[in-house]
Amino acid sequence: MSDKNSMNTKDFLIGSLIGGIVGASAALFLAPKSGKELRSDINEQAQIARDKTTQFTSTAYDKGNEWATYAKEKSSNIAKVVSDQSAQVVGKVKEATSNLKTEAEEASNSAEQIVGNLAGEVQNSGEEIAETVKQEINDIQSKIEEEETAAAQSK
């Protein structure tokens, strides 16, 4: 918004300067003076116009340098903030990655322990089942033998 106002002010000043020059020239040409006086007045007004133009150019140049310096400072500050924020984000990502890696390793170790425990329990259960089956078979064989002996004695 201020850029628009400054542009309007610049346009107004330039228009005023040009209008003043045109008005002064017209007044000099239309005034009833001798040629020598008229040329002298024109030279005088031209010198004044040159001085004002030089002054205006110098002021515009100084303001331009001020704004350029200001823009450089602001862009440098922005770049620094962005760089700092990026470094913080990278640090947080690295920390999160490290934490996830540690948690994954812990979960893997825990899973290996669970698998080892289950394998041991399955083996123990298998051995118990095998022992129970053997015992049952022995009991059945003993029963069969007893029944055969009892049947043979009853004959």
Image (cartoon, rainbow, N blue to C red):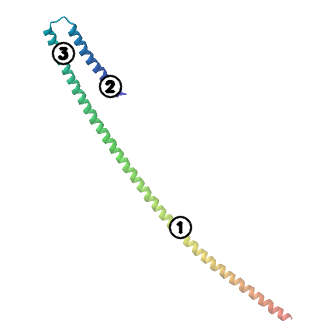
Q: Earlier in the sequence, mark 3 or mark 2?
A: 2
Residue drawn where x is 71% and y is 86% of the image = 138
Residue designated by label 2: 7
The 10 Å Cα crowd at callout 3, few under 14, some 14 to 19, many 20 or more, is some
Answer left or right for 75 relative to 49: right
Q: Are marks 2 and 1 in contact (CB under 8 Å)?
A: no
Image coordinates of residue 92 in percent, x first then y, are 41, 53
Image coordinates of residue 53 in percent, x first then y, are 21, 22
Residue type at tag 1: Ala
User: Which disc is residue 97 wearing?
Assistant: none
Residue drawn where x is 39% and y is 53% of the image = 91
Along the line of sight, the residue nearer the viewer: 92 or 15: 15
Q: Earlier in the sequence, mark 2 or mark 1?
A: 2
Residue drawn where x is 41% and y is 56% of the image = 94
Under circle 1, the secondary element is helix
Q: Are marks 1 and 3 in contact (CB under 8 Å)?
A: no
Report the mark closest to the observer, 2 or 1. 2
Position of the C terminus, as image quadrant, is bottom right
Residue type at tag 3: Gln
Residue designated by label 1: 111
Image coordinates of residue 105 in percent, x first then y, are 47, 64
Image coordinates of residue 154 in percent, x first then y, are 86, 93
Residue type at tag 2: Met
Residue designated by label 3: 45
Along the line of sight, the residue nearer the viewer: 112 or 60: 60
Report the mark closest to the observer, 1 or 3. 3
Count up the numbered dots. Answer: 3
Distance from disc 3 to disc 2, alpha carbons, whole Å, reads 27 Å
Under circle 3, the secondary element is helix
